[in-house]
Amino acid sequence: MSATQLGFTGMPTRLFTCTPSRLTTWLDCPRRYKFVYVDRPSPPKGAPWAHNSVGASVHSALAAWWSLPVERRTPDAAAGLLREKWIGLGFRDDAQEAEWRERAAGMVASYVETLDPHAEPVGIERTVAMRTDRLAVSGRIDRLDRRGDELVVVDYKTGRHILTTDDARGSLALALYALAAARTMRRECVKVELHHLPTGAVIEWQHTDETLARHLGRAADIAAEAAAAHASGEDSAFPPNPGHMCGWCDFSAHCPEGRAAKAAYAPWAGLAPDITPSSDD
């Protein structure tokens, strides 16, 4: 019997607990969402991706670099941390792994040369959270800077995709991070930046209250769709979204429609300059 039938029409709606990644997974493919967030146990994933290993290693090295004493925050130290925290999974062979380890070491060394080691961030790998009348959102920000009286969300990118302003402006994750950071830190946060380490490019976007509100509304709509699918309990509520990105799916082996749309790529394919993987960090 429903709450309305029981006369409890004023009962609060249960909040949809999520991360930005959970919301974008639903947008990308409801079936993949089911594999990740609904099925227990989740189906086994495919082999690890080499481009994800590169991204995770770079993120770990940069986080550790900021924890060093200021006098030790040098490019050489960043390269050393990359090698120390290197994840050697998904590569074709030892030679390819060694090549990319040194590429990544050079990447982080070049990047930290552009940073002021004395400019302490507000947070590194900082978890922020917020609630609305429909959502309970949390997420982890790569770096949160204070620039004057404002906070700035910094997101590291390591993939081959050449970023544009549209990537920063249209990112649901960055917008939600900005909103959650402002709530958590009680300080204005409307600027978001993508730092593309392979090219050194910094892509920024200055949100307004209106653009952030639009992203938040979009997040609520996505959550409502996913919650309705959960409530139905039917497999048909989680349809596949077959297309060219299916070749990058961790669950390709469990999805006939996805395999028919695109054969699975090799684990190291995301390192190729002419192929853009589904996730670059």
Image: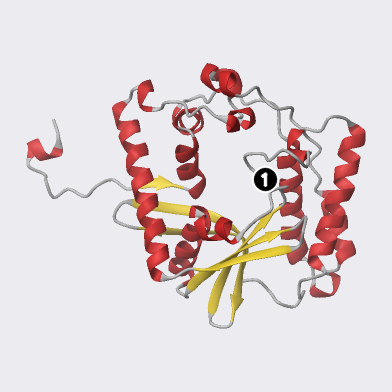
189 relative to 225 in the view: left or right: right
Query: Label 1: which residue?
Result: 280
What is the crowding at mark 1: few (fewer than 14 residues within 10 Å), some, or many (at least 20)? many
Give the x, y percent position of residue 188: 47, 75
Total marks drawn? 1
Residue 128 seen anywhere in this rendered image of the structure: no
In this view, the residue in front, 123 or 175, is 175
Q: Quadrant of the N terminus?
A: top left
The answer to which image quadrant residue 183 occupies is: bottom left
Q: Residue at x 28, y 45 (%)?
A: 14
Colour theme: secondary structure
Give the x, y percent position of residue 3: 14, 39
The answer to which image quadrant residue 93 occupies is: top right
Give the x, y percent position of residue 229: 34, 32
Asked if 47 appears above or below 150 in the picture, the reply is: above
Farthest residue toward the bottom?
148
Give the x, y percent position of residue 247: 63, 28
Disc 1 residue type (three-letter): Asp
Q: Residue at x 49, y 70 (%)?
A: 190
Residue 103 seen anywhere in this rendered image of the structure: yes
Q: Residue at x 49, y 44 (%)?
A: 24
Q: Residue at x 70, y 27 (%)?
A: 265
